[in-house]
Amino acid sequence: MRNLFKYTLAVFLFSALWSCQSGKSTKNSEKETIAAKAKSVLFVLSSNDQMGDTDKKTGVWLEEFATPYYLLKDNNINITIVSPKGGQIPFDPGSLAEGAATEATKRYEQDAELKKLLANTGTLTSVKAGDFDAVFYPGGHGLLWDLTTDKNSIALLEDFFNAGKPVASVCHGPAAFANAKAKNGQPIVSGKKVTGFSNTEEEAIQLTGTVPFLLENKLKENGGQYSRTDDWKSYAQVDGNLITGQNPTSTPAVAEALLKALK
């Protein structure tokens, strides 16, 4: 009887230990599965802070960066930020003004970690499309003078687009598409429903004579099926893996569309 009791006790202890270890293993497995499913998005930002040969300052429009950044981050999307020169990202002074403030930009102002990240961005040559699930280009006039002709940015864009991965941008962001080609040799916007900063919006801020080209015209010249809504109203277009937004007000809609495309 005593031996039977010892045997039963041993079996019980072994079962309990096995169950505990199995539970830990299951939890670890679940964590590993969640980690494996986490998506990654590449943010490509301009390094340019000058409007051509004028004395006008420019850069990235903060709202167009901050809103998608926080929406994706809050949904457990991994984000990597790069720029042509690497290092500090310039923000358009106008986007830092009180009148341009949004919940996302206010959050940015209190985010020391993000500010440090933006002061030490990697270069375009340090990344490859195969390591990410999507790419995003925020606007601001800055990129009209660097990303539109940057060979590394163009190559990245083409890799993302031709792999069928989401390619998203807002406001002046689609200007980065100007010289990117699809597999058939045509511009990536050719035959696609697209939008972007309109001619009348550029006229309203009196920069039509300053910018190297008008984005609305460029998208049309490249075969894009351009459409728009009223100035400064929210408007976004999704055509296949191409996501575009008309102006700063359209940023939340573009961010949501990108998040949806990643799910």
Image (cartoon, rainbow, N blue to C red):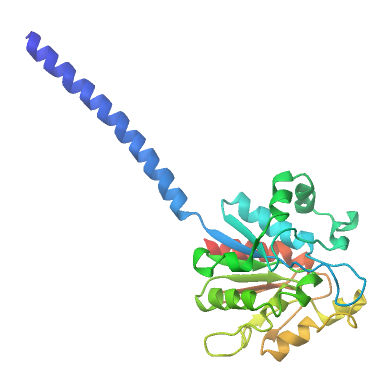
Residue name at image x 90 percent, y 79 percent: 203
Residue 250: percent from the left, percent from the top? Answer: 74, 67
Residue 220: percent from the left, percent from the top? Answer: 72, 88
The quadrant in which residue 54 appears is bottom right
The quadrant in which residue 215 appears is bottom right
| Nearest to the observer: residue 164 or residue 146 | 146
Residue 238 in view of the camera? no
Residue name at image x 81 percent, y 61 percent: 91
Residue 224: percent from the left, percent from the top? Answer: 67, 86
| Nearest to the observer: residue 217 or residue 42 | 42
Q: Is residue 202 left or right of residue 128?
A: right
Residue 166: percent from the left, percent from the top? Answer: 57, 70
Residue name at image x 56 percent, y 51 percent: 76
Residue 92 in view of the camera? yes
Q: Up-down: is 195 above or below 27?
A: below
Q: Up-down: is 238 above or below 31?
A: below
- Number of marks in picture: 0
Q: Is residue 174 left or right of residue 259?
A: right
| Nearest to the observer: residue 135 or residue 118 | 118
Quadrant where the N terminus lies?
top left
